[in-house]
Amino acid sequence: MQKLDILAFGAHADDVEIGMAGTLKKLADSGKRTGICDLTEAELSSNGTVLQRKQEAKLAGKILTVLGRYNLGLPDRGLHVNEESLKKCVELIRAVQPSTVFIPYFDDRHPDHGHAAKLVEEAVFSAGIRKYNPELGNAHKVKRVYYYFINGFHKPQFTINITEQIHAKKQALEAYESQFVLTGDRVETPLTNGYVQKIIDREYLYGKESGVDYAEGFISKNMLCMEEIPLE
């Protein structure tokens, strides 16, 4: 596996795209090596199959120019901090050695998103411990952890201007046709009732509060320190 600058974790394929597709695209366009890890195959999703989700994830990753897309195959609705799950996460972190990790914000209507956050937090810490399962690779310390929002409209600590990337974000979301488009053989879910447009509208509101057209919101796990006060 090639080394990455940025690794974004989601419980299911489409989580990362919902929360931070624009930021990932912006980072990739600036030359950063980005990757996405889907913790589960979303096998319990009301619509779509595992194969469909993997194909959709591959297309979305291509739109966002990510260098690596990984799936750890952990059980859907079974994300918990246990030794097996922790080892899989640690092994990936040590293999790709990201300086920055993004994870779902724990306050979300879907329990898997909060469980994913806790699991990856634990994995980030354990990955940096030299004597923790050294057979999983050399210890690696992640420098920064940030939370992105999936279903909620939370108060972010900071936002990223994604005005130039909003079209790519919409395209990446629309790649998940099995989740967001209600057809005759699918059942209605919270995702099939104009959900993509609601996400775009949310980013518009974050942008409005930030003085730009569109933005994505984030919270830092650690206190942020700036070299100077932004004056412009």
Image: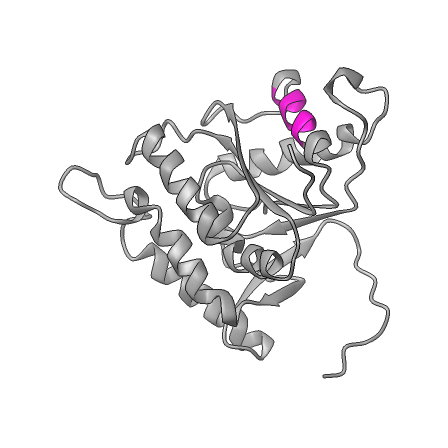
Give the mark count. Answer: 0
Q: Position of residue 66 (x, y in %)?
A: 55, 47
- Residue at the image position 35 percent from the left and 49 percent from the top: 175
- Residue at the image position 42 percent from the left and 41 percent from the top: 57
- Residue at the image position 66 percent from the left and 64 percent from the top: 158
In the displayed structure image, the side of residue 19 where residue 125 appears, left or right: right
225 up-or-down from 179: above or below: below
- Residue at the image position 64 percent from the left and 62 percent from the top: 30
112 up-or-down from 167: above or below: above
Q: Which picture quadrant has residue 55?
A: top left
The span picked out in magenta is 85-92
Q: Position of residue 140 (x, y in %)?
A: 79, 33
Q: How is the image coloured?
A: one colour
Determine the main secondary structure of the stretch shown in magenta.
Answer: helix
Quadrant of the rendering where the C terminus is positioned:
bottom right
**Is residue 197 shown to the viewer in this render?**
yes
Which of 177 and 65 lies nearest the eye of the viewer?
65
Quadrant of the rendering where the N terminus is positioned:
top right
Point out the residue furthest to the left here: 184
